[in-house]
Amino acid sequence: MNKTLYLYTTAGCHLCDMAMAIVHPLVQQQGIKLELVEISEQESLVEKYGVRIPVIRLDGQESDLGWPFEAEQAQAYLLSDQ
């Protein structure tokens, strides 16, 4: 089953660039699709994630993982759904 990992981000977010560097190798390794979500395009996303980005959320999970996180934490989050 193909999963999607959503990375909530916005333009000019240097922390989001750092998060991308952490999660990109993990999703490639596990065959998970990575989708960037620009929060500024939806007011509801700005309200939910505006002060928390970068945030990752695995498709089908209610929980998410907000910054700061390291590779080990992101890996554990990705494996928590299996």
Image: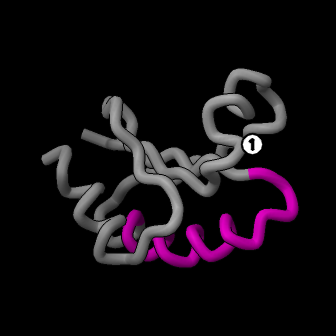
Question: Which quadrant of the structure image shows residue 45?
Answer: top right
Assign a secondary structure to mark 1.
Answer: strand
Q: Is residue 18 visible?
A: yes
The rendered magenta stretch, by its main secondary structure, is classed as helix
Q: Residue furthest right?
A: 12
**Closer-to-camera residue (46/24):** 46
Which residue is at 49% across, 75% downward?
22
Q: Is residue 22 left or right of residue 2?
A: right
**Closer-to-camera residue (45/59):** 45
Q: Write the start and end of the magenta stretch as one range.
A: 10-27
Q: Is residue 11 found inside the magenta-colored segment of the image?
A: yes
- Where does the image place residue 73, in percent across and percent down from the top left? 31, 68
Which residue is at 48% across, 51% downward?
56
- The residue labelled by disc 1 is 38
Q: Quadrant of the N terminus?
A: top left
Q: Looking at numbered disc 1 in the image, what kind of residue is underneath it?
A: Glu
Q: Is residue 74 left or right of residue 76?
A: right
With respect to residue 30, does 45 lie above or below? above
**Closer-to-camera residue (48/71):** 48
- Where does the image place residue 12, in percent across and percent down from the top left? 86, 64
Which residue is at 20% across, 57% downward?
79
Q: Is residue 36 visible?
A: no
Q: Is residue 59 found inside the magenta-colored segment of the image?
A: no
With respect to residue 51, does 16 lie above or below? below
How is colour applied across the structure in the image? one colour
Q: Residue furthest front?
A: 51
- Where does the image place residue 46, in percent across and percent down from the top left? 74, 33
With respect to residue 82, does 41 lie above or below? above
- Where does the image place residue 75, in percent across and percent down from the top left? 29, 67
